[in-house]
Image: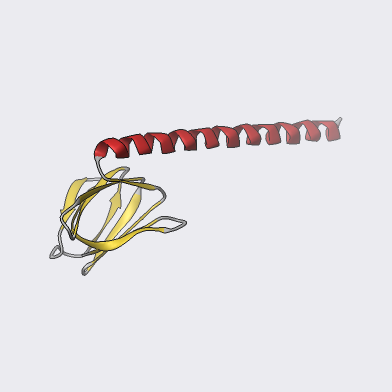
Amino acid sequence: MRLKLLLPSEVLLDEPVQKIIAKARNGSFCLEPRHIDFVAALVPGVLTYVSETGQEVFIAIDEGTLVKCGHRVLISTYNAVMGDNLETLRDTVEQRYLQLDEAERTARCALARLEAGVVRRFTQMQG
């Protein structure tokens, strides 16, 4: 099978694989080359695949969609982080979320200042 992992800004992965293990809303499932074609809504979690060389690779993913058509498997998600083992993947995900939390706090603070300025000017115009 050929696994292609798509993010909004890039193609994170495009390589041949032997097996894919993912988690959908109704539970975990395993895909192998002879499985039927289908579509699944993925939940945040760890996606595992076995490369052509037999190496197990872990990818932390956000919500997404998986489409299997023939020997092609496409996964589209907002966020994904790759790791060689679960421990380093956990650390990488924690660091990434801490960065996202800080960026979100900064954006919320800027938005609150902007809203306060608009309200202040609106009340000045009325008065």
Where in the figure is residue 59, as x and y percent of width and height?
30, 47
Q: Does 56 sit above or below residue 10?
A: above
Q: Quadrant of the N terminus?
A: bottom left
What residue do we see at 27% from left, 35% from top?
A: 87
Residue at the far bottom in the pictured view: 70
Residue at the far left in the pictured view: 34
Q: Does 126 sit above or below residue 25?
A: above
User: Which one is nearer the viewer's eye here, 76 or 48?
Assistant: 48
Where in the figure is residue 54, as x and y percent of width and height?
15, 55
- Can residue 27 be seen here? The reply is yes
What residue do we see at 55% from left, 32% from top?
A: 105
What colour scheme does the image use? secondary structure
Q: Could you say which quadrant of the image residue 36 lies in?
A: bottom left
User: Which one is nearer the viewer's eye here, 102 or 67?
Assistant: 102
Where in the figure is residue 18, as x and y percent of width and height?
16, 59
Q: Quadrant of the C terminus?
A: top right
Where in the figure is residue 104, as x and y percent of width and height?
53, 36
Q: Is residue 88 left or right of residue 18?
A: right
Q: Is residue 76 left or right of residue 123?
A: left
Q: Is residue 29 left or right of residue 113?
A: left
- Can residue 4 be seen here? The reply is no
User: Which one is nearer the viewer's eye here, 37 or 82?
Assistant: 82
What residue do we see at 21% from left, 52% from top?
A: 49
User: Which one is nearer the viewer's eye here, 101 or 96?
Assistant: 96
Q: How many labels, in total? A: 0
